[in-house]
Amino acid sequence: MAHIIFITGGARSGKSTFAEKRAAEFGAPLGYLATAQMLDSEMDERVRQHRERRGAEWHTIEEPINLSQELARCDGQYKAILVDCMTLWLSNLLFTYEADGPTQCEKLIREDLLQLRDILQAMVTPVILVSNEVGMGIVPDNALARLFRDIAGSANQTMAAAADEVHIVISGIPLTLK
């Protein structure tokens, strides 16, 4: 049974750096499962900087949609797998399912999330999940943004409940919650 570590925090809080350090404690080789899609030059630059920071002991796997299946495929190949990040994965799912309407979209994402939880609990490789804490700001001004906030909040609760360890990073300082 895998060890599940859930790390949350605001944008640019230091959660990815903390997650990378925590993953390195397991030793190499390390898997980095990236959910981002490089859709513009600014995102290309962010990805380049992240790769440089991580170094050669990391193997990058890019999967924006089929996170559960990719984690299952990678199980046993690494000392630990870092998923960065769940928030982008949820965003990718939202845009995949949004044409089905808000209720169906939320239902489909919830099914994907529960499948992810079940896969994680069956894995032998420790997995570190990074996710943004998006519900601490103002109420979004449009329905799609509110739907995303609600989905992300629910997803964070589900993953935190399933995790063996939960950390929040604020201003570069990790705090252990569980």
Image: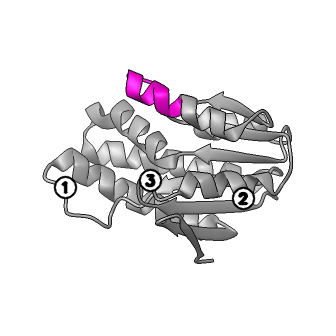
Indicate left or right for 72 with 141 as reference.
right
Q: Amino acid at mark 2?
A: Arg
Q: Residue furthest bottom?
A: 177
Q: Secondary structure at mark 2?
A: helix
Indicate left or right for 24 with 89 as reference.
right
Residue bearing the label numbered 1: 140
Q: Secondary structure at mark 3?
A: loop
Residue bearing the label numbered 2: 22
What is the quadrant of the C terminus in the image? bottom right
Q: Nearer the viewer, residue 114 or 11?
A: 11
Residue 42 belongs to the span the image colors magenta: yes
On the image, the x and y values in percent for residue 65 come to 51, 32
Residue for point 32% across, 63% down: 135
Of the image marks 2 and 3, the number of the one nearer the N terminus:
3
Let me know if residue 12 appears in the view. Answer: yes
Let me know if residue 37 appears in the view. Answer: no
Marking on residue 12: 3
Q: Amino acid at mark 1?
A: Pro
Q: Which residues are magenta?
A: 37-47
What is the CA distance from the residue labelled 3 to the residue labelled 1?
A: 20 Å
Q: Amino acid at mark 3?
A: Arg
Q: Residues within 10 Å of mark 1 (few under 14, many from 20)?
A: few
